[in-house]
Image (cartoon, helix red, strand yellow):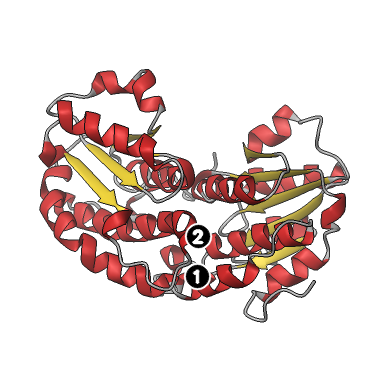
């Protein structure tokens, strides 16, 4: 089959090297912020293809050595710079087992880029500071990989509506910044004074909550945080909730939204409204994004807009973002 002409050439080239009908298991492997995009990728694959898949931290992938990893496996990895040593090692390990490997990275010549069978590039504003179109982001690339693979494996061909939706994503993000701006302006002063901020989400949005918790609040602002699944919230974590507890709740549009609705009700029942920031996708103008993909693309809107909130917090705390890190990429570890 032919993929849409607007498909990324790197994705097309990578998928052309995969015999999709012979694949029996998909592994999504990465670390940190790159790992966060693997959760919504698996969510999308689960929605559209009857094939088992797993999400792994790269180091644990090698240490656990899953027995199912073999010549009928597809391993999709991601490292923004391509220098994440655990991810490069995971790619090399997967190849020793005969698996087909696809790596997403900014640098095809990086260690991970050299370790995989096929490289898919993307753009990222967080390391360069240069704005991008969201259709060229890592989310967009991995979604193209997933639905391209689904079509090639004999599932429904949804590649054209996906591409059309990705074309509409950046305008939707721009509108979302305007929609959420009053909330960010209102909540930033209080949140900037907090030592602990929890993030809550489920389904496709969980990865965005995870990334914001560990890569932004903890890594860049030294604010204690934890990403809590909206249903797991009721299996222990809700005991920390009181009028002083601070939460960010992401309410998406996928099939797990009722879980987030339940968390929303409980948070407002026992917490204080000024300490509960709810980003609700139902308030957004998603014109041009196909209804069947809104739940998948909303997480990128959440994450992109939350970066602006993070910079507001950083300014109020007089704490630099990327430049203020003590350990990350500054010493051996």
Q: In this rendering, is residue 114 above or below 245?
A: below
Q: Earlier in the sequence, mark 1 or mark 2?
A: 1
* Of the pair 90 and 155, the residue shown nearer to us: 155
Q: Assess disc 2: are there few (<14), some (14-19) or many (≥20) residues with their C-alpha within 10 Å of its C-alpha.
A: some
Question: Is residue 197 rendered to the left or right of residue 226?
Answer: left
| Residue 39, percent from left and from top | 54, 44
Foreground residue among 277 and 197: 277
Q: Quadrant of the C terminus?
A: top right
Are the residues at dot 1 and dot 2 in contact (C-beta closer than 8 Å)? yes
As drawn, the label of residue 331 is none
Q: Residue at x 80, y 71 (%)?
A: 1
Q: Quadrant of residue 46?
A: top right
Frontmost residue, 81 versus 240: 240
Query: Where's residue 146, x and y in %?
Result: 66, 57
Residue 135 lies, in percent from the top left, at: 51, 71
User: What label does residue 165 carry, if any?
Assistant: 1
Left or right: 185, with 160 as reference point: left
Q: Which residue is mark 2?
A: 293
Does 206 appear above or below 175? above
* Count of numbered labels shown in the rendering: 2
Residue at 29% in and 46% down = 221
Determine if residue 331 is in view.
no
Between marks 1 and 2, how big is the CA–CA gap?
Answer: 7 Å
Q: Position of residue 172 (x, y in %)?
A: 36, 70
Q: Secondary structure at mark 1?
A: helix
Residue in the image at 73% along x and 43% along y: 51
The answer to whether residue 239 is visible is: yes
**What secondary structure is found at the residue carrying circle 2?**
helix
Q: Mark 1 packing: few (<14 Cα in 10 Å), some, or many (20+)?
A: many
């Amino acid at each position: 089959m032919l993929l849409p002409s607007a498909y990324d050439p790197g994705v097309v080239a990578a998928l052309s090297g995969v015999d999709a009908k012979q694949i029996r298991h998909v592994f999504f492997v990465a670390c940190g912020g790159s790992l966060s995009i693997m959760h919504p990728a698996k969510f999308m694959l689960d929605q559209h293809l009857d094939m088992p898949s797993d999400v792994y931290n790269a180091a644990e992938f090698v240490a656990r050595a899953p027995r199912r990893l073999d010549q009928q496996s597809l391993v999709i990895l991601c490292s923004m710079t391509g220098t994440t040593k655990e991810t490069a090692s995971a790619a090399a390990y997967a190849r020793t087992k005969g698996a087909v490997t696809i790596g997403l990275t900014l640098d095809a010549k990086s260690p991970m880029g050299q370790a995989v069978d096929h490289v898919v590039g993307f753009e990222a504003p967080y390391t360069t500071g240069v704005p991008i179109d969201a259709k060229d982001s890592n989310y967009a690339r991995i979604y193209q990989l997933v639905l391209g693979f689904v079509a090639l494996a004999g599932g429904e061909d949804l590649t054209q509506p996906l591409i059309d939706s990705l074309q509409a994503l950046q305008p939707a993000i721009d509108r979302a910044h305007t929609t959420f701006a009053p909330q960010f302006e209102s909540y930033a002063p209080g949140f900037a004074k907090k030592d602990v901020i929890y993030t809550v989400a489920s389904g496709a949005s969980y990865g965005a909550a995870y990334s914001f918790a560990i890569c932004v609040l903890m890594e860049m602002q030294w604010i204690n945080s934890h990403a809590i699944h909206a249903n797991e919230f009721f299996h222990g974590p809700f005991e920390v909730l009181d009028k002083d507890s601070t939460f960010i709740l992401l309410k998406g549009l996928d099939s797990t939204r009722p879980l987030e609705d339940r968390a929303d009700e409980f948070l407002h029942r026992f917490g204080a409204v000024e300490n509960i920031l709810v980003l609700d996708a139902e308030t957004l103008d998603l014109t041009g994004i196909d209804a069947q993909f809104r739940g998948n693309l909303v997480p990128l809107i959440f994450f992109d807009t939350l970066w602006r909130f993070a910079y507001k917090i950083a300014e109020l705390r007089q704490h630099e973002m990327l430049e203020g890190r003590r350990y990350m990429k500054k010493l051996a570890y």
